Image: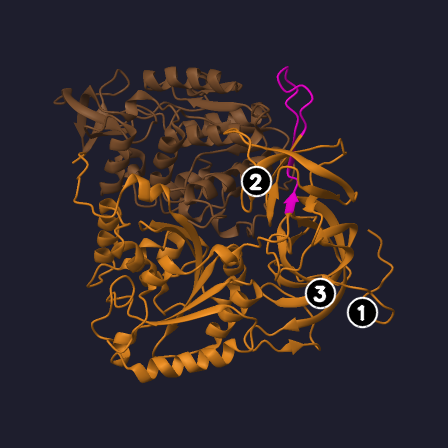
Chain colours: A orange, B brown
Amino acid sequence: MGAIDVVEQDTFSSAGYLNMELLRLSTAGSVDDGKSTLIGRLLYDTKSIFEDQYAAIEESSHKRGEDYVNLALLTDGLRAEREQGITIDVAYRYFATPKRKFIIADTPGHIQYTRNMVTGASTANAALILIDARKGVIEQTCRHAIIASVLRIPHLIVCVNKMDLVDWDQKVFEKIKADFEALASKLEGFDLHFIPMSALLGDNVVDDSENMRWYRGLTLLGLLETIYIASDINRTDCRFPVQYVIRPQSAEYHDYRGYAGRIAGGIFRVGQRVNVLPSGLATRIKSIDTLDGSLQQAFAPMSVVITLEDEIDISRGDLIVGDEDLPIVSQDIELTVCWLGARPLQPGGKYAVRHTTRDTRAIVKQIRYKIDISTMEKIEDDITIAANDVARIKIRTTTPLAFDKYNRNRTMGSLILIDEATNVTVGAGMIVSPTQLVTGDVNVADGGTI
Amino acid sequence: MNRYGLTHLKELEAESIYVLREVAAQFERPALLFSGGKDSIVVSQLARKAFFPARIPFPLMHVDTGHNFPEALAYRDEWVEKIGAHLIVAFVQDSIDSGRVVEEKGYNASRNALQTVTLLDAIEEHKIDCAIGGARRDEEKARAKERFFSHRDEFGQWDPKNQRPELWNLFNGRKAMGEHFRVFPISNWTEMDVWQYIYQEQIPIPEIYFTHRRNIIERDGVLYAYSDFLNLRPAEKPVEMQVRFRTVGDMTCTGAVESPASTLEDIIQEVAASRVTERGTRADDKRSEAAMEDRKKQGYF
């Protein structure tokens, strides 16, 4: 013991590893459809599980009186959930192949934990949805697909699992595929893929299935390695939310004033004409600086420091944009909100708002309708918005926000609502559009001042 | 790679820099917990990048158990000087002398668990409202569930069932008086990413990460560095071995591995091929399968 076992390796080379891309994916599934087993299988078959981890779950499986090593135990992290046999919070898992590094946000499928699914999926490039082949498309499947659609996850991979329990029957797979496509046709577009598999036995996860030769598509890993993700980021609209002002106040950088931030869209170049919002003043980019040297251009999602030709008063929360394709600036905003708080959304209530790097406050002007996340139907007669509900609301902010619609830019179109009494994040908002409130359109007392 | 695509290391770097700038913007008195281990070294390098050309706008803080590898201490002082950071040291010995903690007895005595009290006291003394750490989610099962911004109540405790949802890159650092945050900028990095980054950036690291000859006490499958801090059992005798360390911690609970790796490339090859997680060499996690979860709830880093 103690010595590191060096095993034969064929997948690693320094150069290859340094040239990998990052793909973020989230998983969603019901309690028994084998999601933890699937992730365990991905980790195990890509050799991402270590001997001591494997030994620990082998021992746990044995203690629980199970016949085989339960790969699901790899992802069931906290003791409380191991005891209950369910996953209770988002857990992050990592694995890599020579092509890509993967971050899995493993989220629970229970209805009461929609907030965790939203948390796990908000930054995902791709979502895995698991369907038990014996059960087909059920209410939870619809819910997961709808949330994935609301969050605008670009790629959706439907894993039809437990094919071993339906005799690897192609007809079962085709039926589920057709049912899901019917559901997806009602949702706003994502790139959709279907894979028949058995996570327990490993068919079509990393290795091709001997049992389903009728399936000609890629395995799950093959798909994850090749999905085209470069277009997931907005490359046209230049957006730079100012995060922090850099003023070294040193002899060497005496008058230096730089704006630190992470590019949220587009490509910025030295010399480019830019506007600063909300002031609206125009200037040019003087330099793009990093510790590793100055750059001629920078693009999303890089973190850089930008200096400007003119001295303009800029602080955290301001936005530097290109002079074409300007964002929308408004105080009246309509959004889809996933409610996460224990207390229901208060009509007329005031909340702290965080949008990009800007903090402001808002009042809830109207709850337009609730969305049934199993059917996508509008509910207009019951507009109590409790935890895990999704609703369309209108808010008015104390200061104008410069934003893009969520479907154009996820960073520029998302915001969170914070309960000012508890400081807890209670709402996840996706901006649909600016609104013009007209008389009669307001169903809460309009007298609220912030 | 696409013309406007980033490698995974560059994307992770950009994410971590973003998190560090959020800390500086949202908190009044943050501090970066610095152990001299590779993870906190990477975080401090990222902090340099985040605020360049200004200096890091918060101090580094070392919780010193008194049982350090001398090489790690020497490295710490050199690195802090190189990056021009301000260093605060909090001593576990002070907590022992003042009666805040009682030193463990017996052969497996370690000051590792005592650090928690010293850390929480130092947070209070320096009025630190955000402690930045180098923990990664791939290290251990309980850590896999940590947020980037982890809220702690006024007792410094973590409540895993009641974590704030973390959406997009909108980090909510709002808190009541007396509460504080732990922030983990390299949450999404793996051990491999850290090594590759150190290699790519040519960041200096303490010598004990590289192979060397050392007197070792082998106990319960763990190779401990022989030192005055270790209470020897009657039959135990130090044996000289060719080893290196995969983590830098307290000498009484950090295990070595036998290894000939003398360069970063060697280490990367070894990590790529190794079949035991780095925490597998730490005795403090072996006490029970849920050991980390228990310590975290108490405020352990």
Q: Earlier in the sequence, mark 2 or mark 3?
A: 2
Q: Earlier in the sequence, mark 2 or mark 1?
A: 2
Q: Position of residue A112 (x, y in %)?
A: 52, 64
* Residue A72, above or below B184: below
Q: Which mark's residue is nearer the viewer, 2 or 3?
A: 2
Q: Which residue is mark 3?
A: A393
Is circle 3 on the same chain as circle 1?
yes
Q: Are marks 2 and 3 in contact (CB under 8 Å)?
A: no
Q: Is residue A318 visible?
A: no
The amino acid type of the residue labelled 3 equals Ile
**Residue toward you, A373 or A422:** A373
Element marked by disc 1: loop
- The quarter of the picture where residue A406 lies is bottom right
Residue positioned 61% across, 41% down in the render: A269
Is circle 2 on the same chain as circle 1?
yes
Element marked by disc 2: strand
Q: In the figure, is residue A203 to the left or right of A88? A: left
Q: Which residue is mark 2?
A: A297
Would you call the spot at circle 3 few (<14 residues within 10 Å), some (14-19), or many (20 or more)? Answer: many
User: Does A246 lie within the magenta span?
Assistant: yes
Q: Which residue is mark 1?
A: A443
Residue extent of the magenta highlight: A239-257
Q: Main secondary structure of the magenta part?
A: loop
